[in-house]
């Protein structure tokens, strides 16, 4: 596995719920300068929304995709049970999600679960492509978090209410 000391040491530290220190495009532009073309293609293909398995995926990407599928399954199980009137206790993985009172807080709790998973995995890699992939996935989580705009959300909600009442 190739080592990318300079690139990794030049990246800003990421913390959950912080403002985005650099955009996805800026990160990829800088990474492209330092990575071999094959490594760059693998990095660029890492996407928190793409859960389709690929033989070309790095082991860490496969691990993340499996984690994400399990996370979604656990959330789905509780939601389906509650919709049908059955009381289902959430698994330890998603307990924090269902302790929240509003959808935004639930979404933030889900992002925190993803973040913690990635943070834990990143401890096992040093200056290599796996570390960069995890960093890129964490950057995408932050991108989603910073994309929430309370005013826009209220406007969309109001429009939906007007249509429903309309």
Image (tube, rainbow, N blue to C red):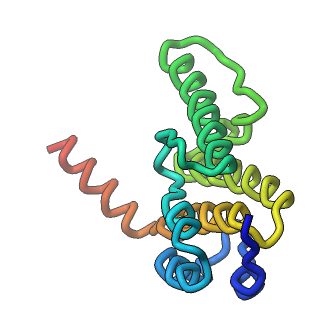
Q: Establish if 131 lies above or below 157.
A: below
| Total numbered labels | 0
Q: Residue at x 79, y 53 (%)?
A: 121
Which image quadrant for residue 123? bottom right
Horizontal relation, residue 122 to residue 103: left or right: right
Residue 60 percent across, percent down from the top left: 69, 50
Residue 27, above or below 121: below
User: Is residue 140 or residue 5 the one in the foreground?
Assistant: 5
User: In which quarter of the view is residue 11 placed?
Assistant: bottom right
The one of 68 and 166 positioned closer to us in this rendering: 68
Quarter of the image with the C terminus is top left
Instruction: For the N terminus, give its image quadrant.
Output: bottom right
Q: Position of residue 137 (x, y in %)?
A: 61, 61
**Residue at (61%, 54%) from the top-left corner?**
108
**Residue 59, horizontal then vertical, whole percent:** 68, 47
Who is closer to the viewer here, 75 or 141?
141
Q: Is residue 63 left or right of residue 122?
A: left
Q: Residue at 72% x, 70% y: name it.
A: 2
Q: Residue 152, percent across and down?
A: 37, 67
Seen in the picture, residue 32 relative to 109 is either above or below; the reply is below
């Amino acid at each position: 596995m190739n080592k990318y000391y300079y690139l990794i040491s030049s990246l800003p530290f990421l913390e959950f719920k912080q403002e985005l220190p650099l955009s996805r495009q800026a990160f990829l532009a800088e990474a492209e300068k330092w990575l071999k073309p094959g490594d760059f293609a693998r990095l660029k293909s890492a996407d928190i929304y793409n859960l389709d398995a690929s033989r070309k995926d790095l082991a860490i990407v496969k691990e993340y995709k499996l984690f994400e599928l399990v996370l979604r399954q656990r959330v789905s199980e509780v939601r389906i049970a509650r919709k049908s009137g059955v009381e289902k206790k959430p698994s330890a993985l998603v307990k924090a999600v269902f302790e929240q009172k509003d959808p935004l807080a639930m979404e933030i709790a889900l992002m925190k679960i993803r973040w913690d998973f990635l943070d834990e995995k990143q401890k096992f890699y040093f200056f290599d492509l796996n570390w960069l992939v995890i960093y890129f996935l964490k950057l995408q989580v932050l991108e989603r978090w910073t994309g929430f705009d309370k005013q826009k959300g209220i406007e969309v909600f109001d429009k939906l209410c007007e249509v429903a009442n309309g």
